[in-house]
Every structure is written in structure tokens, then in C-alpha cells.
Amino acid sequence: MLGLAILLTACSEPRTHLLLITVDTLRRDHLGVHGETRDLTPQLDAFARDAVVFDAAFAPAPFTRPSVAALLTGHDPGTLGVVSNAHPFRGSVETLATGLWGAGFQTAAVVSNAVLKPASGLARGFEAYDADMREHERIRGAPERSAEPTTDAALAQLDRVGREPERPFFLWVHYQDPHGPYTPPPALRERYLGPEARRPGDPGQLAVSDDSRGLGAIPSYQYLDEQRSPAFYRAGYAAEVRHTDAQIGRLLAELGARGLERRTLVVFASDHGESLGEDDYWFAHGEYLSDVLVRIPLWIRGPGLEPGRRADVASLLDVLPTVFRQLGLSPPADLPGRDLFAAGAESRSSVVHLSTFAEASVPRRGVVAEGWKYVRSGGANPAEQFQALDETGRSTAPNGAAPQMALRERVRAHGHELARTSAPPAPSLTETERRTLEALGYVVSEPDETPEIAPPAP
Ligand SMILES: [Zn+2]
């Protein structure tokens, strides 16, 4: 009887909706809230003023499918077996979509990156999964959808779920535009080209690589119009961010126009960043675990949440338990992440395990813990890097003794834990899937080829 009484009480009040907005390849430092000065994100900055902004949020991987899988499940990508953009999510664990659908939510997604198509396994639990991509990248020809039709499709889903107003909804919208090749509206690129061209210390002209890696050269899939100046690409990237911001603004405005704003929990994040020349790594992601790649924006606005900044370390793995609690649901018990709004949460920090998994030319693993970010690289020349986090979570030059042994031990123990708990290797790709991914420049390897990093010499 008690259960029934609780259920009846719950049903008598309007329930909170969930809107999850993710932007592919969006660097944190291109957002005004996080220090960008070119006004690239006026719409998002306005949204952030009403949100809880996590200044030290990290993605577990610097590329799409593992990072998104972690966001949607609350599990480490390694545990899920999603260790490349070619490895599908085949696990049976609860996801945002399955959990909320089971709790009576309408579930819908609009995704505009080809590696998130239903073959990714990430569509499980969504009643509607719109992956209708009719545009094609200029170089590789990969299907994609730009920001304006993505917002149009999201609004169509809002119309659809609006027909059952007694059921709350979960809508996930994934924008693709800042991902290369950078093909913004031309006038927008022009706007940012002048200041970029005057950036001191830039190499005049870059080489062009014949692979898609971006190590010391422009990746083949980014090379446009015989342009080899960094300014052309940096301006293009900035313009893509500006263009996406306008379309997210349109989506958020429509949410308000439909009277849903006060009843909707909105989570905004990116799956990873982009290197724009840092480490001599150009217009790409996946190779390193640098801040420009794994330090991401994570903002949450919702009924009853006091807007403000948070300096404690947060992870994409924290989103599922946080969202479940905000929506009055119990998250699965075995999750590594935490509820970011639990009592006293701001005085704790998440431990974030980082990995390049099967994507990088040299395997890299790391951890954010104990006020430090630690990364070690394998391969022929193993190396270690310790960076202190400042009070806003930013990595700085080491200013004290790092707890080196403890950080190494965390990475080692996590590797062992993954080896013990990882999902069995996903079914092998079909030859067609493999060829498609390789043609897109993705590195396709089987799960048992996932690189293991030897412990560095003492
Ligand atoms: Zn991505």
C-alpha cells in the first residue's frame, strides 16, 4: 500500500523533464563563461548564468563514442567495452534512456554524428532515435547533420512528446558542427579570420598529412581549399562554435516559448575538445589527454538548483546518477560516479580515469585525483606528466610535491579493475562496418588489441 501511495503522490504533480544537449568536439575555452573573449557563445553564456557551472569537469576519453557511452550509462568506457569509435555498446546496463523510459518518460534523441547512429548501440531505450543525416562531410563523405536541421529535428521531437503532456520526456540532442572539417557559413569564418591571422608565434604554413591523425600536420580530412595556414582553420572552428551556439539558443528559446523551461532539467556538455596546435597536434582529437581534449564544459540548470560555479572535480560519469536523483529516481547501485548535488557534494571531488583507449598512436592513460592530473604515455618512450589543479580545477605547472606513488597506483589499479570487469568483446564488426569506419579515418582494432601500458621505470 505504501508503494501505491507514493506512486499516486508522484503522479499528482507535474514531473520534471530532461533535456540533454551535447556538442561534439567543443573546447571549453571557446565558451565565454570559461574565458573566451570573442563572444562566440552568447546564447550558451546566457544559459550558464542560470545554471550550475562545473569548472573542473572531465570526459573519460578524448573521442566520441567512448565518451558519449560513458555519459549515457555512468560507466567507464573500458568497462563497457566501448574502446573505439568502431566498438558498439552491447552491454545490458541501465542507461539514461532505459532508466527514464522504465520510469514512464517519453525518450527521444536527435544525433548528428555518424558514429552515434543506431549501430553504435546507444539507441537502446529511446522510443525515437533520429539519426537522419543527409549532409556529407566535404572530404571523407561521412554522413552528418548541421546545427540548423539538428535544432529543427529537436523541435519536431518536442512537438511529438508534447502530444502526451501527462508523460514527462527525456530529449537528447547531439550537435556535430565543431567537428572537422570546419565548414561554417563563409561570412562567419571571415569574421574571425583577421584576429587569427595576427596570432604571434604561429607557423606560417602547415604540412598536410595523408592520414587523419593531425600529428605535426593538417589531417587529411580537415584539408580544405588548399589552405595551409593555421588561421584559416582556427577561424573556421570559432565560426562553427558561433553557429552552433545560435542554434542551441533557438532550441532553448523554443523550450521557453512552450512553457517548459521551469519544468525541465537541462544538462549541457561536450564529449571532448579539439587540439588547435597544442603539442604540435593540429585540428584533431584522440591522441592526447591534454586539457584542451578532456577538460569539458558541464553545466546543469534545473528546478530548485541554485546557479553558481563549482570547483570540485566532476566527470561525465557523474551525469547519470545526478540526473536520476534530480528526477526523483534511484540510480543503479554499482556506478563509479556520484550525485553532484548530494549534501556536501561540493566539498568532494570525483576521481576521473582517462584513457585514449584504441585511438592514439601511443597509448595513454591517466587520472584526475587528489588535486592533480596524472598522465602516462606508453610506447617506445614511456613518459609521465603530473599537473596540479588550481582552485578552479585548471591544470598548472606543478607547485608542490605530487603524490606520485598514489597517482601511479590509481592508474595501475584501475587498469586491473577494467581487466577484471570489462564487458566481453563486442561482436566483431561486419566487413562493411569496418571498411566504412576505416574510410572515415577511424582506427579500427579489436578489443583484445587495446593497448596496455607497461608501468614506467621506477
Ligand atoms: Zn566527438
Image (cartoon, rainbow, N blue to C red):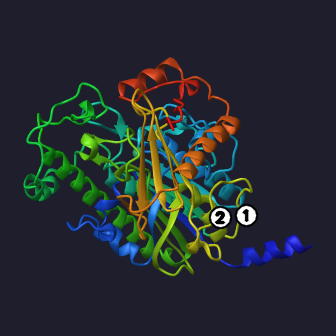
Left or right: 148, with 374 as reference point:
left
The answer to which image quadrant residue 361 occupies is top left
The x and y percentages for residue 128 are 56, 49
Looking at the rendering, the quadrant in which ligand 1 lies is top left
The image shows residue 252, relative to residue 151, as above or below, that is below
The x and y percentages for residue 294 are 42, 51
**The residue under label 1 is which amino acid type?**
Ser
Helix, strand or loop for disc 1: loop
The image shows residue 102, relative to residue 78, as above or below, that is below
- The quadrant of the image that shows the N terminus is bottom right
The x and y percentages for residue 278 are 26, 47
C-alpha separation, residue under disc 2 versus residue under disc 1: 6 Å
Which residue is outermost to the front?
458
Left or right: 63, with 39 as reference point:
right
The x and y percentages for residue 412 are 59, 41
The reply to whether residue 186 is in sight is yes
Counting residues from the N terminus, which is met first, the one under dot 2 or under dot 1?
2
Disc sitting over residue 324 in the figure? 2
**The residue under label 2 is which amino acid type?**
Phe
Circle 1 residue: 330
Determine contact: label 2, label 1, CB under 8 Å. Answer: yes
Q: How many marks?
A: 2
The answer to which image quadrant residue 288 occupies is top left
Q: Camera-side residue: 160 or 93?
A: 93
